[in-house]
Amino acid sequence: MSYALVWFKRDLRWQDHAALAQAAQQGPVRCIYVVEPELWLQPDAALQHFEFVRESLQALDDALRLQGGCLEVHTGELPEVLSRIWTQAPFRQLHAHQETGNGFTYARDLRVGAWCQTHGVGWHEYPQFGVVRVLKNRNLWQPAWERHMAEPLQDVGELKFWQSPANTLTNHPWCTPAQMQAPAHLQHNPPLRQRGGRPLALATLHSFLHARSLGYRGGISSPLSAPDACSRLSAYLAWGCISMREVVQHTRAQIAQLPPSASRHRAGLTGFISRLYWHCHFIQKLESEPAIEWHNMHRGYDNLREHDFNEAHFEALKAARTGWPMVDACVTMLRETGWLNFRMRAMLVSVAAYPLWLHWRPVGEWLATQFLDYEPGIHWSQLQMQSGTTGINTTRVYNPIKQAQDHDPHGRFVRQWLPELRKVPDTWLFEPWLMPHTMQAHLGVFVGTDLAQPVVDLTQATREAKQLLHSRRQTDEVKAAKKAVVDKHASRKNWGTSTSKSSRRTPARKATRASADTTQAAKAQLGFDF
């Protein structure tokens, strides 16, 4: 009996799943997930991602079993896995969502397309976010995003399965990254991370819309309030446990139900919608130009930092030993939880890019393994924006001392994650290197041993970094090339204001006043989380 193969990737749900819904309309379906060893050996992969996926697959399998089916799990590289399945039982069509992933997944999808063409299999891909493949004009992107978000949710209905019990999830011999001989730095699985699965995604959405979003406005910048005030949906969206369209539509429905008196709640949810828009806007950048995963978006900034990389500075950052308490506390929280609010993420990248003068690519690979919600399109676009190599953004330099004073004025966050600072009085908490030696001796806490000495002079290093960046920015070559970056990647006016698609390698046309992602993106404070 002929059937359609549904390939699950970063879309681990069973509702509003276009690939599953379209395949089901045409007859029996066979659902698979493929553990790709080479994918999990990439430098942006981590054990926490693998375990989150495994938890999400279990929830997906449970749901499919309620309808009389199951999820098959295969191990191997895609063309070989497809060939094995085809040899055992030929299928007529392959259905999957489009993926704007890293360079490996992009090349892999090209190989899958070639395999399908060779074997006469129909290869059907469906939009996952409000991202447009082969976007011909950036001015057309926002209306396409609105149309996608306004379309009805895809109802898979009653499924008819093609049965193949040999490779079901329950009896699949899982090959973990450790067994794949992944490097040690990829064996990262924070003990306090969120757990995967659609039921948890729905519960998180419900608690945010009906309770936690009351604190969204004004609560997402501080690492103290952000764990509750932020939606905490970023990981579930990144791995597809819930669709972007579901989140947008449920949020807009909740806004419509609020009474006139709920102005703060309405403002928070409206701001949240704008961040969902920006989420897709940044993924579109990687979709339109995959090379920004490796190269500066504005090539005029090539060799700005690449040849000055200081490995000792990088190791201090990763070890939470920069000497700046707010930075080290954030690195520690991230290591333990797999999550950090956007402002603090931006601060980490800013510190890496300016006073530590580190090129964004190695920093980005490390952070990708630390973020449970790692989304390549947002990640690499943001790394470049915060590092000043897009050529179209204002310079963003976050002073970690000021950030601590503004967002942790009583030191609760710093003391929570850095126990060695709990004895230090407020006077010196954010600048402990200024503490007199007599006070250090009195407390039994010494800078340079118990507490890290700052790796560089913050003021001087930041000033020198900004001078280097701005001198490059003022060259005629860099100025002349800015327009092409604006045309291709900059946001347009009227961002994220109305209701309802998105390109791999295509230019866009000049807008009447492209915002260049500056003021609006800063207001949105979107990014890796929301």
Image: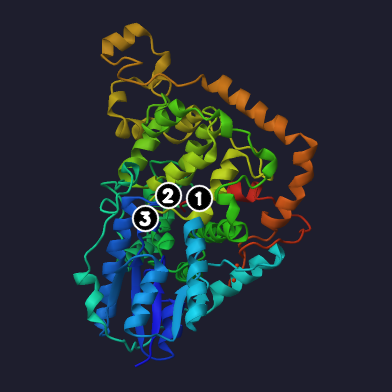
Q: Position of residue 465 (x, y in %)?
A: 61, 27
Q: Quadrant of residue 34?
A: bottom left
Q: Kindly indicate the quadrant of the structure image that contains residue 284.
A: bottom right
Q: Residues within 10 Å of mark 1 (few under 14, many from 20)?
A: many
Amino acid found under the numbered disc labelled 1: His
Mark identifier at residue 87? none
Look at the picture and state if 292 lies above or below 148.
Answer: above
| Mark closer to the observer (1, 2) | 2
Cα–Cα span, label 3 and label 1:
18 Å
Q: Position of residue 329 (x, y in %)?
A: 37, 33
Q: Is residue 447 left or right of residue 138?
A: left
Q: How many neighbours does mark 2 have within 10 angstroms: few (below 14), some (14-19), or many (20 or more)? A: many
Q: Earlier in the sequence, mark 1 or mark 2?
A: 2
Q: Secondary structure at mark 1?
A: helix
Name the amino acid, label 2.
Asp
- Tag nearer the camera, 2 or 3: 3
| Cα distance between the residues tagged 2 and 3 | 8 Å
Residue 409 seen in the figure = no
Residue 432 in sight from this viewpoint = yes
Q: In the rendering, at what x and y percent does residue 170 appear? A: 20, 71
Q: Amino acid at mark 3?
A: Trp
Label 1 vs label 2: CA separation? Answer: 11 Å
Q: Is residue 431 left or right of residue 71?
A: right
Please report the residue visible at 55 percent of the width from the left and 50 percent of the height from the top: 293
Pointers 1 and 2 in contact (C-beta within 8 Å): yes
Q: Which numbered disc, 3 or 1, marks the residue that appears first in the sequence?
A: 3
Position of 495 relative to 518 (above/below): below
Reading the image, the residue beneath label 2 is 44
Q: Element type at marker 2? A: loop
The spot of residue 351 in percent (x, y) is: 51, 32
Q: Determine which residue is flagged by label 1.
A: 379
State the residue position of label 3. 40
